[in-house]
Image: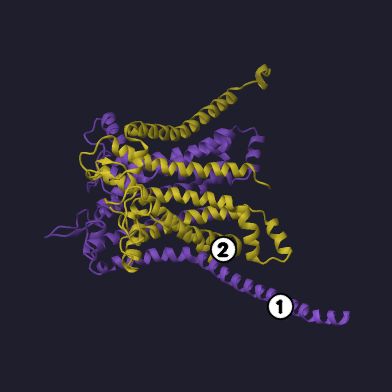
Chain colours: A purple, B yellow
Amino acid sequence: MELGIAQAQAKPVDERLNLARAAVLQRRRWGAVSEVVIEGAIRFCGVSAILFVFGIFFFVFREGAGILGRLDFAQFLFSPAWYPTSESNVRYGVLALIVGSLSVTTLAMVMAVPLGLGAAVFVSEFCGGRARETLKVVIELLAAIPSVVWGFIGISVMNPLIQRVFGVPVGLNVLNGALLLALMSVPIIVSIGEDALKAVPDSFREAALALGATRWETVHRVLFPAAKNGLLAAVLLGVGRAIGETMAVLMATGHAINIPKSIFDPVRTLTATIAAELGEASAGSPHYQVLFVIGILLFSITFVVNVTADIVVKGVRK
Amino acid sequence: MIPSPAKFGETQAVRRRRREERVARAAFGVMALVLVVPLVLIVSHLVAQAFPLLSWDFLTTNPVAGMRKGGVWSALLGTIWLVGVSLAVAAPIGVLAAVYLNEYAGDTWLTRIIHLAVVNLAGVPSIVHALFGLGAFVIFAHLGRSILAASLTLAIMTLPVIIASTKEALASVPNSFREACWNVGATRWQTIRGIVLPNSISGILTGVILQVSRAAGETAPIMFTGAVFYKKIEAGNPFAYGLKDQCMALSMHLYTVTTQVPDVPHALPYAIAVVLLGTTLLVNATSIALRVYLRSRKKW
């Protein structure tokens, strides 16, 4: 009797076990499937950055392609005449815009490079603990100010300031834009420069100090040569940032297409031109397409700058 | 010749070196200070000028009278929508991309190219992102000028920030954690989900929050892809915008009021700038505070 019951129960137990086993197997199979799916997604996202970079080039190129066959490249690059909306004599020369971008960027770098590298040295070598943390936070906040706010500062603060200090009639000029760009690109120079200094092994510092060198001697005889490439990359990335900046220079450089003769002349940059004119150019018109060609030009410039910076940094690791 | 008794004291050379050291320290300190001063001056100047207009009502009422009066509600809401949607797109892609780079990819040519692509994506000028967004999303994908198109443009722009910071967060999880997990038979993905992500979630969040602040401040990428000078919406309704709508945005609003609208009251652009700056700095400060807090209670 008892045996019978046991036998009667045995089957369902067996079945239950089988079911449980099947469920586990099922779950494992699902786990394996979902693992494959998720890994696929991860791999796809991993290469997405490459797709996006190509996508950017492709789509900007696609919109601008229509005019490439008809565009006189010698005139495009070397003529300062930019009359995109002229009825009788349309000219697309971006020389003045290139010079505008270069002048603002160069002046900005003249101010930002010593400041940025100096601050990087100070943060990394001369101060410690609380002061260092505070400075890093300030620099991070400086980097967080939106470019349109910088542009507004250019118009509302720098403009009257430059008029008063230098006695010029208009304060929206190369100097104004360069000041803003300098403040905007300093944070990136500081953070990359600090990384470069930090990458120098401490044994270098210790060796220099053991020889009796002062901190300053350590910095300029040991750390500068050792971190040279990283510091150069920091400067290059700052340049890339400054060339690509749009809103601040759009608002603060005076918006006149002009090859500047002094730092108090207004200019217009490549980026500002796109931002200012794209809204007015009707889609598909030659003017619209030329603006996309300028976009390709900008993309190429920053691409070269960034790749160079990357190669320079990689050089130091080898 | 009898050696001078000062031989072991301060020679001229030592004094000169000491002096150089002091000068160098002071010079570098001044350079660092030059960065702190403008931030403080600028922020305090903006707040002081904006003060008469700053109030809760300024945030919750719509701009009126040709944007010369009223608040910033429609612009603020537009910014929130743009940032929210771009975050929803960029955060998963960015985090997974970082997981790939840190957990899966070996030191191959593909990894090298991905790294280069991320660096370049970070360096593409914002106005080129705008051109891309216009060409790809607005025109090619037929999204039209809409919140969706603008947010996608912002998402791609902020992707490298998320990838870089997430990668750093993942790299800070010690390898022994992963090895322990593999040793009990967990698969790669189980290890990532169970061990790596929970242990680096704080760092990942920090990076994502940073992305929010960057996206909120951008103007150029949204100018031609979805943001407009003016749009009338119902005040106080957070769902007054839809994905297919165009919208206003704080950054665009500041640009418009500063450069396109004549006879604006003096304090208005300052107030808009302070709201925008306040939003981004608040978000940034949150991220910094989170980082400091989490670093202080790190377990390894």
| Left or right of residue B230, residue A27 in this image | right
Nearer to me, A218 or A190: A190
**Residue drawn at the location 62% of the way across and 65% of the way down:** B189
Give the quadrant of the N terminus of chain A: bottom right
**Residue B285 visible in the picture:** yes
Amino acid type for the residue under numbered disc 2: Tyr
Give the total of numbered labels. Answer: 2
**Residue drawn at the location 57% of the way across and 66% of the way down:** B108
Chain label for disc 2: B
**Residue A197 visible in the picture:** no
Q: Report how far apart the C-alphas of labels 1 and 2 lie in the structure.
A: 37 Å
Chain label for disc 1: A
Q: In the rendering, at what x and y percent does residue A9 appear? A: 80, 79
Nearer to me, A220 or A96: A96
Nearer to me, B236 or A149: B236
SS class, disc 1:
helix
Determine which residue is flagged by label 1.
A19
- Tell me where residue B171 sits by quadrant: bottom right
| Left or right of residue B291, residue B32 in this image | left
Amino acid type for the residue under numbered disc 1: Leu
- Tell me where residue A212 sits by quadrant: top right
Q: In the rendering, at what x and y percent does residue A33 appear? A: 60, 74
Determine which residue is flagged by label 2.
B100
| Left or right of residue A222, residue A210 in this image | right
Q: In the rendering, at what x and y percent does residue A70 appear? A: 22, 68
